[in-house]
Structures are given as C-alpha cells and as structure tokens.
Image (cartoon, grey):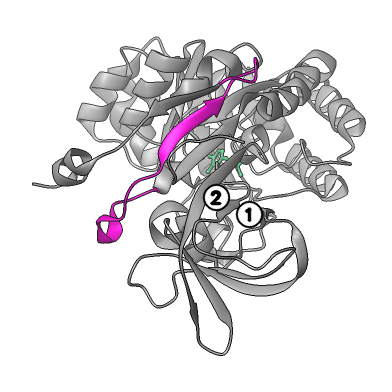
Amino acid sequence: MTHLKTPYYLIDERKLKKNLEVIAKIREDSGAKSVLALKCFSTWCVFPLMRKYMDGTTSSSLFEARLGHEKFGKETHAFSVGYSREDIMEMRKFADKIIFNSTSQLEMFRDDVKGLKLGLRVNPGISYSHFDLADPARKYSRLGVLDKKKVMEMAPLISGVMFHFNCENDDFANLAKSMDYIGEKYGSLLKKMQWMSLGGGLFFTKKGYPVKEFCLKMKEFSGKYGVQIYLEPGEAAITQTTELVTTVLDVVHNKIDIAIIDASLEAHTLDHLIYRTTPRLSSPVPGPHKFMVAGRSCLAGDVFGTHKLKRPLKVGDEVRIADAAGYTMVKKNWFNGVMMPSIAVRRLSGKIEVVRKFGYEDFRDNLS
Ligand SMILES: Cc1ncc(COP(=O)(O)O)c(C=O)c1O
C-alpha cells in the first residue's frame, strides 16, 4: 500500500520487464528488431529499462522523433503522415530512417535527405482491426501507398518499406495469412529492400500468444526475401503495466450507486471515450456490489463503467483503473481543469518513485 496523493498513474517496472523479455526473446529467436511506437507510450522515465530490450523508437511527428532520439537513443525511425520542409530539416539531424507516407512526399523531400535510409509506407489493402476508426485499410484511407505500380517505381529511391495493417491482432493464424499475402504481392519489391517494418498492432505479449510460431514465421519471411524485419510495438510493450490510482470523492444515487472519483475518463483515459470501451478495475476486485464509477468532469458520459465489486464504495476508498498506459498517458489533457494525475514508477527494486507532479501552473501554461 502506498500513501501517494491521488490521482496518479503508477507504472510497474517488473510488469514492464515481463513484456520486454518477450520482445527480447523474439529478437533473439527470429532476428526481428523492435522499435517502440511512441504514439502509444512516450513516458520516458522508464526508457532506461526499455532500451535494454528494444532497438529504438518509431515516431509519428518531429517531436516524437526528437524525444526518441534524446531520451531513448539507439535507432530513431521517423514517420509522418505529412512532413513539412521544416520537419525534414530538423529530423535529418538525428533520424536514422525517414519513412514517407506517400510518393509525392518522397519525391518532394528526397534531395533534402540524401544519405539517409529512406522508406515508404505501403498500404497492402488488408487489415485486422475491430474498429473502423483505427482501420488503416478503411475506405478512402490516406495511410500508405496502395498503387503497387507506383510503389515499384519508387524502389530505387528507398531501402525499405513499412506495412502497418494491424490493430490489437492476437490471432497468429490471421497474421501468418496476411504475411503470405504480402509476400506474394510484394515479393519482388521486398527482394530489392534491406528492411521492412510490419508496423504495430500485434499482441505477442498477450498471455497464450504462440510466440514460438511467430518467431518461426518472422525468421522464415525475412530469410525468404532477404530483409531485416522491424516490429513497431506500442501496446504490446506496455500492456498491463500501469494503473490509474484514484480516490472516491462522493457517492450519489440515481437508480444505481455512483462513485465519483478524483479523475476523469475524458481527461485521463481518453481512448475509452473515443472507442466506447470500458476499462477494467484492478481494485477493488469483483464481487456482489454494483457501482457505477464516474469521473469528476462535467461531461454527462464521463463514466468508467458499471462494475460489480467485492465491497461497496465509500468516500475515501481507492479505485484503481487497470491498463492505463497505452494511448492513455499520451492523450491526457486539461479538460475542465481537473487535477492532472502525477506519474509514479514502481522500480524493479520495488521502490515507488514519483517522477512528475502537475499543478495549477501547468494548467495555466498549457494555453495562454
Ligand atoms: C505506423 C504505426 N506503427 C506502430 C503502431 C503501434 O501500434 P500498437 O500500439 O497497436 O502496437 C501504430 C499504431 O497506430 C502505427 O500507426
């Protein structure tokens, strides 16, 4: 039990290490390198641990790329759906690879990035996603080049290609089938490349995932086409490592008991609101008492779900929202001026360190 002031995000390095060990094993057994997708998680206080197991970072913008370079080190992959010339001029100082989203951007900036490893995002036209919002192969998708002829024309300008076509894919058979499809369709291109990225969205750290088969597939594929495979795990690297720890401020009743906590779904776990998903609670544990857990913002739907709990909630009780790292901390915001959760880390030693506290000045200076 800790006596930190809530709300706070608590990252557990021992849990993180378990995911990282799977990533390192994949590297060892298959040769596939992993770069952390900073769009998912960029809380750099745990990068010293992560960098021991991963090969670097990949980014979606100039600032992410710079953070990866400054705080993580190793390989810095840059990607953006749209670069400006200013981005390119900055990025070329530290990025190892610059991946373009379109042939027009590649042609626009190729002379500015001479000597760097360049790549192109290819949209294979297939995907695995439960959400249209996150489906890179959705109708009218702007993510990557679909036209194979255009991709082939660019081959002399690039050393690699990136395919990101999965979202929370825990189905290895589906992935294997998609890789076979990509191999058949783009095999002649891949044979001209030095590297290819399979993007993120692969759930290989999930309990029960067939990591051995996955490694065999990666090894076979990279051998067949002579490419270094990169994986870009975001969620898989940090899943199940972090809690949002909160305190009940009030209990009200409207046909159901509603516990109001000192955090907000919209401000502190925004992805649940975007995707209409319900977070799991890690504490209290399940039981017979039905409670709605709700946030303290004024949004009527600021609700962390209705849960059946072991004990009834009362003012002052602790409520822990599970799995609060991925696409969560990176999206936290100052809506309603609600107190921003501090960031704490349970280090490998077991010691809890508060690495960041936020105050009124941070709220004020977020705008002007
Ligand atoms: C290009 C790219 N790489 C990697 C990722 C990370 O995906 P995930 O966090 O699902 O592993 C994403 C997520 O959108 C992405 O767009």
Q: Amino acid at mark 1?
A: Gly
On the picture, is 282 further left or further right than 36?
right
Image position, residue 88 (x, y; %) = 28, 25
Image position, residue 4 (x, y; %) = 47, 36
**Is label 1 in a helix, a strand or a loop?**
loop
Most foreground residue, 64 or 187: 64
Most foreground residue, 203 or 325: 325
Image position, residue 214 (x, y; %) = 85, 33
Whether 103 is drawn above or below 293: the answer is: above
Among numbered discs 1 and 2, the one appearing first in the sequence = 1
Q: Residue at x 89, y 26 (%)?
A: 216
Q: Which mark is residue 107?
A: none
Q: Which residue is mark 1?
A: 125
**Is label 2 in a helix, a strand or a loop?**
loop
Q: Is residue 343 magenta?
A: yes
Most foreground residue, 363 or 60: 363
The image quadrant that residue 198 belongs to is: top right
Q: Contact (CB < 8 A) between labels 1 and 2?
A: yes
Q: Which residues are magenta?
A: 332-351
Quarter for ligand 1? Answer: top right
- Say few, some or many: other residues with alpha carbon within 10 Å of mark 2 (under 14 / 14 to 19 / 20 or more): some
Whether residue 214 appears in this view of the structure is yes
Marks 1/2: CA–CA distance = 7 Å
Most foreground residue, 327 or 112: 327
Q: Which residue is mark 2?
A: 146
Q: Residue at x 65, y 17 (%)?
A: 348
Q: Residue at x 38, y 32 (%)?
A: 106
Q: Residue at x 58, y 43 (%)?
A: 243
